[in-house]
Amino acid sequence: MTPDDLRQHLAQLQMTFGIAMPEAPVPLPDIALITEATDRAALSGAFDLHRLTRFVHPDDRAPVRQTLAEASTPVAASRLRWLDPDRRRAALSTLLANPAGLPALLSRLRLRRDDAPGQTLRRLLRGWRPDLARLSEPRLAALITALGWLDGLPAPTGPALPDARAARLELTRRERQRNRDAVLTNGFVGRQDALDALKEHTRDPAHTGRVLIFTGPGGIGKSALLARATAELGPSVPVFTFDFDQPALDPRGPGLTLDLTRQLALLVPREAGELSQIRTLLRDTWRESGGETGQTGEASLRATSEAGTRIAQVVHDNGLYARPVLLVFDTLEVLAAQGPQALDTLNEWMNFARYNLGMSELRAVMAGRAAEDAAPHFPQSITWTVPPLDAPDAQQLLVNMGLDLPRADAAAPLLGGNPLVLRLGGRYLIDHPDAPAEDLAEGGPADAAMTQGLLYRRILNHVGAAADDPLRRIAYPGLALRLITPAILRHVIAPALEMDPDATAALWDRLTRQTWLVERETDTRFRHRRDLRTEMMRLLRRDEATAPLVARLHERALAHHRRADDPDVPADRARLEAAYHAFMLLEPGEEPENTDAASLNAALAGDIDDLPLHAAATARALTGVPPRPGDARLVPPTWRDSVTARLAWAALDAERPVEALALDNGDTPWCWRLTALLTSVDWHGPLAEATLARLSPLSDDGAPRWWAEHHRLWTDPRFAPIAPRETQAMAEAAAAWLRLFRGEREFVPGWSTGARPSDPPSRIAMMREAVAEALALMQQGRTQDWRYVQPIIRPGVLTGQGVDPTADDESARIALLTWFTGRLGRSDGQPHDLSTELGRAMDRQEREQGPPDPRIPLRPAMIVATPARIERMRGLVPGHKQALAGLADIAEMVTQDATVADLTGTIARDIAGTLTLGNGGRIDRLSRAGYTPAELIHGLMHEYRPPARILLRAFVRDEGARVCLSELLPSLLFLADGPFLPADLQPSEWARGAGQGDGTRAIAALVDWAGRIGRLGEVFDAAASLADDSALAARLRHLAQATRITDRALGGAALA
């Protein structure tokens, strides 16, 4: 646009909008000046607007600078600016398309000395073609930036430009090498036994497919150990390293496979082009499938499988299929903090790499804090705890740092054997030559972590040149923040510490040079070291003097990130930081605003332990991280029952029923409590075994002949010292359940066989026995004999006295659970009449008239399902709006003439649907008992698991049985129609896991998975047909029959 065109355009605007124009026209700059200024900016990196436009006459500078300012963005905490990418690309394209004037422009251009990208671009345009191997890392980074500006534009004159992909690979290789060298600063001392173990793991063919886990506290040297060991392996063993400190490596997305292809390109540069295309395919496939990082492992594997064939071809073509390949996973605690699913998905991905990508000789090494807790997720894993350095090695590390021998000898015993503590303490003594080693001693005993934290603070308190140095003022409390940017220094830290913002901003360069305190993410964004923060946050929480200041920092940081106006923090990252600081400010009992599990997992992964105790407990409840003992007391009331149930089920899965019973507060649902009581009985104890051995079918008069046998056994002095915790009632209930699982349903005794006991343990045993009896009857279809079912719903069965509302609710929950199960329990497909008892269970008026006469059989037609009775079910789902609305709709459909039996199928399906709808984090009481809505129908699987594991463990102790059953797994699980089979159930992996120890890990996986997809009965049948022991085969066959009810309820529907 010429000046005349611009004047004409302004005149048109004046006429259209009535804009007042000065009588004297504003002088317009020469368009050529604006063009040259833009060209100079395009040939520069970050530029100074005033310096770049000095070539313009002073009278014309203002409009030129205004035009250029509108086409660029400022660099934080400086006067420099960056030209917008589109403007740069357009200017460079024009220059390269018409290169005649380019040499003269390059001669006139005056670049800043520290403008490395601009200097590099000018040299490239003048014909410079560098040797990548001889460039320093900063120059290599500048070259990559300059080549990026030229990508896709007309080629400049002269030889071909360097390959940008090769430059990026070279920089990546050097960065990885630098990171590895960084953890080995001052040399590597000690740890020879751990190094030998890792080398053996890598070279021993027996370790193929296995995982070696290094665990230990922060700073103990796990990363240094991995770096040293992989360096010693040499090129004969390809090593692929993944650090879960990088969020992009979430195994539930394609990040691991993408990074694997990048590292393959470093290993085999000639395949870089093919691997780059594979990465593009991976990203496109992931986006097209609607995947989101952290969503599901199955979606990730589906996306990666599209490119798996091409990756496998690269692996095969370069001989990696027949060589030991080592995968190294560091900072495992960050992944573990996202919950067990993340660890299971990592195990699935490793099997994908081994079986689908062709790395058949793969083995893995993992390192992290408390990493031993992750071992159950990785079959055949070996855990190695990294110990502290011994005294000679600790002294040698200090000497390697440059400390003289006498001071190192004095300091080593005071600092202990943690290498990070030794390095920090050694640096302090080197920086303060006159300070005696005793300065590092702490007065009084303290736990190791607190001692470490106190040492950190002492060192932080010596940051800077003097006591009043502002850098020292921000070092200690500033660790409350995860991120540091120039804007955070100015707008968060300075106001909170009541410091001058300009003076604080000037500390940026000094602060970012403290590499032991901060880690670089970008040139203008750093983060505090995670290992340092982990220890310091504990100290900050206990420091009463600093607590108000830390709270102000969190408040200002929360406001800062919610504004999302920090140019150095992307909007999505700002949301994660805001969520973190919001949890830091959470009050006890307060419910957080953000309850989305996916976003909280991303925001808090690896940092949950930094939170106050109550906030950490709430975070674990919301993110799916396994709760810890005591969490139920710390979380808001909304999640208290859910956390208690999760703790109870976790204890039961670990076969610790007594621990689960200890969680009972008198108001917990019966589902997991019944299981805990059942599991707590000594199944193999002499009393239970002898009881079963002496059980005779029936006496001459048709009554079970076991009461007298139990009484005699219990009074037998031989058994008193062996099983003092078993009461007679508990032994009777255990016998009832054992009879059920052995398939002897007709001999499961009724609770009314003897007199009603009065002590609470015996009443609890009665309830267990009654439930076992009802399940047995449902399997037989003998629901017309109501005297066997009445104990489940009879008032007072829990209290031993009159009607009790709590007992009524608990009885109704048991009835509802059996209702859902029983409606599919008959071979003819018709619902069981057991459901009619739900009406009586919820009808308080009828109960007040007294319990029904057990001598009179109840019939379905006697119980009319009135709307009022259906409404009684509202008590089962308090506060659940959708469920309550659904129950109201059901009540309107019920007529006075319809019985519950007539409506069982319809009502059960409708209620099952309403219970699957969540509302504000509140779930129905059945879910609080341990059943998620999706698992409501097959919740009784929990009752089957303990005996199933016991019998299958006995079966798989035989090697031949293990091999046969593993070969049958694919056909048993109907993989063609079912979901992806977990990695630990792949035939070879399962057989290996079953052969380890007593096979608990493999059995647990098999029972859980087969039960969830409705195939458990088939597994037991197959095991029974292979068992050599006839007694064991019979018990497995009976157990198969007992599981048919849950298999039918599931209908073979697979749940991923």
Image: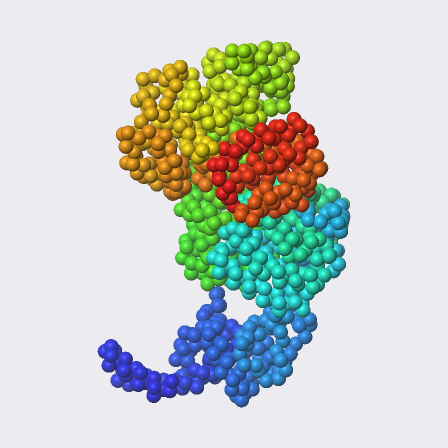
- Residue 500 vs 450, above or below: the answer is below
Q: Position of residue 17 (x, y in %)?
A: 24, 77
Query: Which sits in the foreground, 315 or 881?
Result: 315
Residue placed farthest to the front in the image? Answer: 828
Q: Nearer the viewer, residue 389 or 828?
A: 828
Name the residue: 34% across, 16% down.
Answer: 850
Residue at screen point 66% across, 35% down: 1026
Vertical relation: 244 (above or below) 104: above
State the image coordinates of residue 664 (x, y, percent, origin top left): 48, 27
Residue 984 sits in which quadrant? top right
Q: Is residue 731 left or right of residue 327?
A: left
Side of 990 where 250 appears, left or right: left
Q: Decide if residue 519 is in sight here.
A: no
Q: Quadrant of the N terminus?
A: bottom left
**Image quadrant assignment for residue 847:** top left
| Whether residue 132 can be seen here | yes
Q: Is residue 880 left or right of residue 632?
A: left
Q: Is residue 331 left or right of residue 748?
A: right
What's the residue at 59%, 42% (across, down)?
A: 972
**Where is residue 230 drawn, in percent x and y?**
71, 55
Q: Which of 364/908 is in front? A: 908
| Quarter holding residue 445 | top right
